[in-house]
C-alpha cells in the first residue's frame, strides 16, 4: 500500500505527532471524490440506493497547515460530504488546532501539546478515514468505522498531549491523551436519527465531556504495530417528546422523555502488519453503556410514569488483507462481524464479506470498486427502506474516484 505514505507528513501534523519535523512553513492539501453506490435487497444511506443506485456519494476538503514560529504548528480543514440522506454537502470545520512541540524533554522522550479541534486518533484508521489515497477499499470496515458516526468519532474540541518514547529493544511507544467535548445537533445527524428510529423527537443533545487516548506500540519487528484506543463520553443527555403511533404497551406520544448515560465506553484493540506489498490488519471494538429513560407509559388501563434502565454492549471485529499486485493495482479482501447484546436478553448480529480493487491512474488520481455481501440488518435503517421492511441478506456495490493534491 505504497500510496498511503504520500500523505503521511501532512497526516502526522494533523494528528499532532512529529510537529517540529515539517520542512515547510506552509502546506496546502485537499481532495475531491465522487462515488456511485447501488444496493441489492435493502437500501443503505438513501432509499434510491436500492436497485437504481445513487450518486449522492462525494467528499471534498481543503486544509492549510503552517508554522508561524519554531515548534508551533497550526492548521485548519474545511470539508463537506454527501452520503445519501446524511451530511448533504454541508461545509464543516473538521479540525482547527494548534500544536506546540517541546522536543526531547528526557532521554528518548519527545513531547507536544495540542489545543482546539483535533482528530481523536481512535483506532488504526479514524484519522485517515476521509483520505482515499491511504487505503484500497471504498469504505473502511463498517463494523468499526461506520460512516454514519463520522462526525461524532472524528475529532474533539479540547486539549491533548502527545509523547513518543524510544524504548530501546522494546521499540517505540506513542502515547496520546485528550479531554474535551463535542457539539451534537438535535435536528439532524446520526444521534438524531437513532432517537427518531425509536419514535423520540429530540430537542436537546449534550455531553459533559469526551475523554480518551491511545497507546501505539511500534514493535521492534519491521512493519508491525499494536494499538489500544479508549473513548469515554460522560453524562450524555437527550430530552424531547415521544412521537409515533402510541397505544397500549408504549410511551405516550406528545409527552416528555429524558434519556441519560453516565458513560459511553468505546475500546478498540488493533494490529497492523506491513510486509513488502502486503498489509494485514485486524481490530476488535467493544462498546458498553448503561442508559436510563423516563417517560409516561400507556399500560392499557391508564398512563403511568415509568423509568427503564438497560445495559447495552456491542462486540465488533474485522480482518483484512491488501496486496499490491502491480505498481498501479491493489486488491483487498476482508470479513467483519458485529453483535449487540442487551441485558434484558435480546441480541442482534450481522456479518459481511467484502472485496475491492484499486487502480492508481496517476500519482494524484485513483479509481476504486468494492462489493460487500452482508447477512443481518445492523447497518440499516428501516426509515431508509422504500417499502419499510428489511431483508436479512443484502449487498452493495460502490465505485469511487478521487483526486488529491
Image (cartoon, helix red, strand yellow):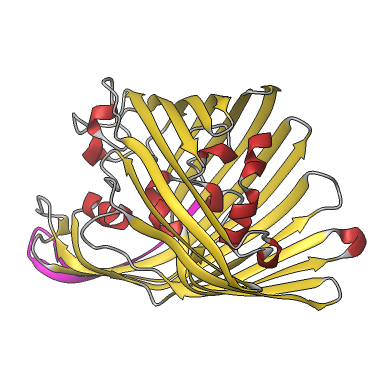
**Residue 265 image offset from top left, x and y in percent:** 51, 64
On the question of residue 392 being in view, the answer is no
Residue placed most toward the observer, 288 or 306: 288
**Residue 137 image offset from top left, x and y in percent:** 53, 32
Our reading of the magenta stretch's main secondary structure is: strand
Q: Quadrant of residue 290?
A: bottom left
Please say whether residue 312 is one of the residues in the magenta stretch. Answer: yes
| Left or right side of 276 for 90 | left
Residue at 35% x, 45% y: name it: 81
- Is residue 239 depicted above or below 288 in this figure? below
Residue placed most toward the observer, 238 or 123: 123
**Residue 160 image offset from top left, x and y in percent:** 57, 73
On the question of residue 292 being in view, the answer is yes
Residue at 73% x, 31% y: name it: 278
Please say whether residue 162 is one of the residues in the magenta stretch. Answer: no
The quarter of the image holding the N terminus is top right
| Left or right side of 113 for 118 | left
| Left or right side of 298 for 228 | right
**Residue 190 image offset from top left, x and y in percent:** 32, 53
Residue placed most toward the observer, 268 or 200: 268
- Is residue 14 depicted above or below 322 in this figure? below
Residue placed most toward the observer, 63 or 245: 63
Q: How many labels, in total?
A: 0
Residue at 75% x, 72% y: name it: 110
Magenta residue span: 294-314
Residue at 60% x, 67% y: name it: 213
Q: Which residue is most to the right? A: 169
Q: Quadrant of residue 43?
A: top left
Amino acid at each position: 500500500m505504497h500510496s498511503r505514505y504520500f500523505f503521511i507528513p501532512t497526516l502526522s501534523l494533523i494528528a499532532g505527532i512529529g510537529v517540529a519535523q515539517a520542512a515547510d512553513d506552509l502546506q496546502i492539501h485537499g481532495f475531491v471524490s465522487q462515488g456511485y453506490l447501488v444496493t441489492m435487497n435493502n437500501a443503505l444511506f438513501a432509499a434510491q440506493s436500492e436497485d437504481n443506485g445513487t450518486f449522492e456519494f462525494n467528499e471534498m476538503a481543503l486544509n492549510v497547515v503552517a508554522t508561524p514560529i519554531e515548534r508551533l504548528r497550526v492548521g485548519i480543514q474545511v470539508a463537506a460530504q454527501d452520503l445519501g440522506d446524511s451530511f448533504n454537502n454541508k461545509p464543516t470545520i473538521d479540525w482547527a488546532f494548534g500544536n506546540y512541540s517541546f522536543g526531547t524533554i528526557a532521554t528518548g522522550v519527545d513531547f507536544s501539546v495540542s489545543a482546539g479541534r483535533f482528530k481523536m486518533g481512535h483506532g488504526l484508521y479514524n484519522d485517515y478515514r476521509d483520505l482515499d489515497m491511504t487505503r484500497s477499499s471504498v469504505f473502511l470496515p463498517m463494523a468499526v468505522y461506520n460512516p454514519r458516526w463520522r462526525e461524532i468519532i472524528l475529532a474533539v474540541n479540547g486539549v491533548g498531549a502527545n509523547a513518543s518514547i524510544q524504548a530501546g529493544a522494546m521499540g517505540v511507544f506513542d502515547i496520546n491523551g485528550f479531554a474535551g467535548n463535542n457539539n451534537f445537533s438535535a435536528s439532524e445527524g446520526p444521534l438524531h436519527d437513532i432517537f427518531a428510529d425509536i419514535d423520540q423527537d429530540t430537542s436537546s443533545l449534550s455531553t459533559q465531556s469526551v475523554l480518551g487516548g491511545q497507546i501505539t506500540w511500534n514493535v521492534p519487528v519491521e512493519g508491525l504495530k499494536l494499538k489500544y484506543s479508549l473513548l469515554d463520553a460522560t453524562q450524555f443527555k437527550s430530552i424531547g417528546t415521544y412521537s409515533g403511533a402510541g397505544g397500549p404497551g408504549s410511551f405516550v406520544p406528545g409527552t416528555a422523555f429524558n434519556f441519560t448515560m453516565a458513560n459511553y465506553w468505546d475500546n478498540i484493540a488493533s494490529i497492523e502488519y506491513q510486509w513488502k506489498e502486503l498489509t494485514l490488519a485486524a481490530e476488535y471494538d467493544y462498546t458498553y453503556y448503561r442508559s436510563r429513560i423516563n417517560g409516561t407509559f400507556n399500560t392499557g388501563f391508564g398512563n403511568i410514569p415509568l423509568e427503564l434502565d438497560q445495559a447495552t454492549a456491542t462486540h465488533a471485529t474485522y480482518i483484512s488483507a491488501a496486496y499490491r499486485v502491480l505498481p498501479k493495482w491493489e486488491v483487498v479482501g476482508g470479513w467483519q462481524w458485529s453483535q449487540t447484546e442487551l441485558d434484558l436478553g435480546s441480541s442482534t448480529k450481522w456479518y459481511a464479506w467484502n472485496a475491492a480493487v484499486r487502480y492508481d491512474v496517476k500519482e494524484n488520481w485513483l479509481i476504486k470498486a468494492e462489493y460487500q455481501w452482508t447477512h443481518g440488518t445492523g447497518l440499516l435503517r428501516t426509515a431508509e427502506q422504500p417499502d419499510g421492511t428489511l431483508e436479512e441478506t443484502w449487498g452493495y456495490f460502490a465505485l469511487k474516484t478521487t483526486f488529491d493534491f
